[in-house]
Image (cartoon, helix red, strand yellow):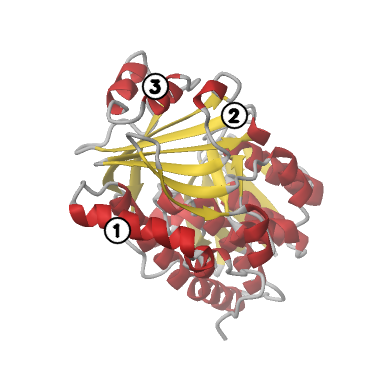
Amino acid sequence: MDILIAGGGIGGLAAALTLSRNGHRVRVFDDRAPDAADVGAGIQLSPNATRVLASWGLGEAVDAQAFYPQRISLRDGRTRRRLMSLTLGEKLRARHGFPYLHIHRGDMRRILLEAVIAACGDVVSAGTRVTGLSQVEGRPRLHLADGMHAEGDVVIGADGLRSAIRHVLFGADRPRFTGYVAWRGLADAARARHLNIEPEAASFMAPGAHAVTYFVRGGHAVNFVGVFERTDPPEEIWENEGARAMLARDMAPFHEDLRELSSLIERPLLWPLFDRMALPRWSAGCATLLGDACHPMLPFLAQGACMAIEDAAVLARCLENVSGANAISGALQRYEQARKARTARVQAEARAQGKFFHAKATPMRGLTRTIMGLGSGLAPNLALSRYDWLWGHDALTAALPA
């Protein structure tokens, strides 16, 4: 089939790769300029995603760019004291068969892009913005900003939170500001060596805020995220001369090492966090949605990229040996049925995690932290098992709706 994909981020390129390897002809339309610099900062990929990447033959390429943390830790933001931890590394690999890793978003996108080009040639139209969609006699047509259009058998809207495809299929609904903003950026690891950043994914909790640190690019860079509460959203991506002063004010409640790390960020960006209400449907006719276009994730479970990769794997399975508009429409319905409950649970868990990170100090909160710390120390396998439903999921073999 001819498959048109709106959006060339991680989800769109993952879909392009696996669909092309299944024999489909794919075209990707991405509004980024051909020479766009790396966007974003670090992402975390848990075994449910690295399993899929390995099946696509990307394990070696990912390994060359990744950092493998020893554990996930929750720490006190003011003292840096570890409150609880989950052991990763070989222990987690033995449990689920695949690793937990950190990688720069730009590096992951580049790996996927190179794999797509190797599989099916130069099929990514960079700098091409999709503005709309129509479906005539069962065939979808993408409308492009330059006045041109592209027609195919299937359209996949992988065009993010403000998806043009979602807007056409299901009408206008504004993203909801969650009350969180996140500072993010990278610091050179050599410049931060004296701060003793540990080889882990660490979340530092404070009342109404939390910060996250972990290594990317093989340990050469430290990814920093600081999440704070706001009443009103600032600009979506914001950087000016006042940024460093504002970041320093926000970081005042945290340990001096974390404050210094935030000052070492090469390019601090402020990122308001939005989400959307759950959609009753993801698909209409021969068009469907993928990733943030249908289930935007708060980053507090580190599953946004993972869910998009899972989506791509399941969508490709559902479109195997399918042809004809009616069969395509049915396959897309199966895809959304296979994915909706799982992604809704991840969305809900991520929202709950944010509330936990930002909870105000109370005796009950202190008791909860103590119990969690004892549990992770005395029963580490039990603590890890809490995430089996998430990290142990196999999108390549999970049962599909009939």
Give percent across and percent down for residue 269. 42, 27
Give percent across and percent down for residue 340. 45, 70
For the residue labelled by badge 2, is the local secondary structure a helix, a strand or a loop?
strand
Crowding at dot 2, Cα within 10 Å, few <14 / some 14-19 / many 20+, comes out as many
Asked whether, in this view, residue 316 is left or right of residue 275, the answer is right
Q: Is residue 351 visible?
A: no
The correct choice, above or below, for 45 with respect to 92 in the image is above
N-term mark: 1 or 2: 2
Which three-letter amino acid code belongs to the residue tagged 3? Glu
Q: Quadrant of the N terminus?
A: bottom right
Q: Which residue is mark 3?
A: 239
Crowding at dot 3, Cα within 10 Å, few <14 / some 14-19 / many 20+, comes out as some
Q: Which residue is mark 1?
A: 368
> How many numbered marks does the figure carry?
3
Which three-letter amino acid code belongs to the residue tagged 1? Thr
Residue found 56% across the figure and 34% down from its top: 32
Q: Nearer the viewer, mark 1 or mark 2?
A: 1
